[in-house]
Image (tube, rainbow, N blue to C red):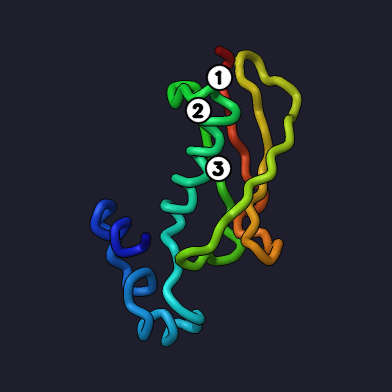
Amino acid sequence: QTYRYAEASGDRNPIHVDENVARMAGLPGIIVHGLCTMAFISKVMIDHLCDHDPRRLRRLRAHFSWPVFPGQAITTAVWPRPDYESLKVYTYETYNPAGKAVVKEGIVDIASS
């Protein structure tokens, strides 16, 4: 996951691909790229809030609060906020299997269909 994303994105920061460097940085091992985590989150939003239409996803904001490790499943919870003009605005958080928030205070704007 991290190795393929590093190649595709050009982000070869060693904390994502080198166990020793990640440990020297104080991490227990390599971590998933933040933008890779956002890609998984955006897929969930597009599938469940945009009726599979990526053009409706207008904004996806994330505050990374904890690393995601390779192979970890993540779960995203979404809460609606009042409509703003022609957009539907939601807040969300994403959690690791232990229930720790890896993304807090997320905001997603979805255009109406």
Q: In this view, does 113 lie above or below 36?
A: above
Identify the image quadrant of residue 24: bottom left
N-terminal-most mark, 2 or 1:
2
Q: In which quarter of the image is the N terminus?
A: bottom left
Instruction: Tell me, for residue 57, which label it has, or none.
Output: 2
Query: Residue at position x 54%, y 22% from top?
Result: 51
What amino acid type should be assigned to the residue bearing mark 3? Arg
Q: In this view, does 30 lie above or below 113?
A: below
Q: How far apart are marks 2 and 3 (CA)?
A: 11 Å
Considering the numbered disc 1 on the image, is that residue within a helix, a strand or a loop? strand
Query: Could you tell me if the residues under marks 1 and 3 are in contact, i.e. CB atoms within 8 Å?
Result: no
What amino acid type should be assigned to the residue bearing mark 1? Ala
Q: Is residue 63 above or below residue 59?
A: below
Considering the numbered disc 2 on the image, is that residue within a helix, a strand or a loop? strand
Image check: 30 left or right of 10? right
Considering the numbered disc 3 on the image, is that residue within a helix, a strand or a loop? strand
Query: Residue at position x 55%, y 12% from top?
Result: 113
N-terminal-most mark, 1 or 3:
3
Residue located beneath label 1 in the image? 111
> Tag 3: Cα neighbours inside 10 Å, few (<14), some, or many (≥20)?
some
